[in-house]
Image (tube, rainbow, N blue to C red):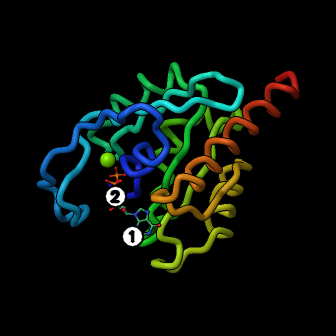
Amino acid sequence: MGSGKTTAIRAISDAAPVSTEAVNVDKAAHSKAETTVGLDYGETRLASGERLRLYGLPGQSRFDFMWKIVARGALGAVVLADNSVPEAVEGLNPYLDAFDELARSASMVIGVGKLLEGPARIDDYASALRARGLCLPVFAVDVRRREDVLLLLEALLNQIEVYEGLGT
Ligand SMILES: Nc1nc2c(ncn2[C@@H]2O[C@H](COP(=O)(O)OP(=O)(O)O)[C@@H](O)[C@H]2O)c(=O)[nH]1
Ligand SMILES: [Mg+2]
């Protein structure tokens, strides 16, 4: 919550993004005024002319029933971490568990926001992934910047292409 999913989809979407913001009544989890109670949705056109559809899933575990449904049809996943919160690195684990199939098929990239606002560094995230037997790209990002969101999506698509190219 507050890692920047809604912001990222807004930054990248060609069409007007759809989001379902409601007054945040869980100020203990995050102080922001509004929070997403359903999905964020946006679309972006790739250089190839194909359309990439972006679904922002609510991160709170009470929404985890939605994760599996969307993961089933997903090409890949971007996991956004908020480094300003305590135990941000360990906080990735529920998502790595829930999206294990995408993680194991290299169809996942990690974006770390607010990097300088917390003690963990990019290497800490990479080590935590390695400890789980995963080798996934980890980028420091500011998802308010369109270029940063594009970087995540390009890296994700490259990963998927390389993995498919291995014939696995
Ligand atoms: N300072 C700082 N703020 C950021 C950064 N990335 C995102 N934000 C802010 O963090 C908030 C994220 O909120 P939102 O997009 O609603 O998060 P969501 O709950 O994941 O949908 C927004 O106010 C962004 O402007 C960053 O790298 N640095
Ligand atoms: Mg949101």
**Is residue 91 visible from the viewing direction of this image?**
yes
Instruction: Check the image and report above or below for 18 versus 97.
Output: above
Q: Nearer the viewer, residue 117 or 120?
A: 117
Q: Nearer the viewer, residue 44 or 120?
A: 44
Extreme residue toward the right, this view: 166
Q: As drawn, is 50 to the left or to the right of 38?
A: right
Badge 2 amino acid: Gly
Q: Position of residue 21 (x, y in %)?
A: 21, 43
Quadrant location of the C terminus in the rendered image: top right
Asked if the beta carbon under badge 2 is closer than 8 A to the nearest atom of ligand 1, the reply is yes
Q: Which mark is residue 4?
A: none
Q: Nearer the viewer, residue 84 or 103?
A: 84
Q: Residue at x 45, y 59 (%)?
A: 144
Badge 1 amino acid: Val
Q: As drawn, is 81 to the left or to the right of 39?
A: right
Q: Residue at x 26, y 44 (%)?
A: 36
Asked if the beta carbon under badge 1 is closer than 8 A to the nearest atom of ligand 1, the reply is no
Circles 2 and 1, Cβ within 8 Å, touching? The answer is yes
Sequence-first tag of 2 and 1: 2
Instruction: Check the image and report above or below for 123 versus 159.
Output: below
Check disc 2 and report the residue beneath it: 2
Quadrant location of the N terminus in the rendered image: bottom left
Answer with the quarter of the image where residue 51 lies: top right
**Is residue 101 visible from the viewing direction of this image?**
no
Check disc 1 and report the residue beneath it: 85
Answer with the quarter of the image where residue 3 lies: bottom left
Q: In what element is the residue under mark 1? A: loop
Q: Residue at x 65, y 55 (%)?
A: 129
Q: As drawn, is 79 to the left or to the right of 68?
A: right
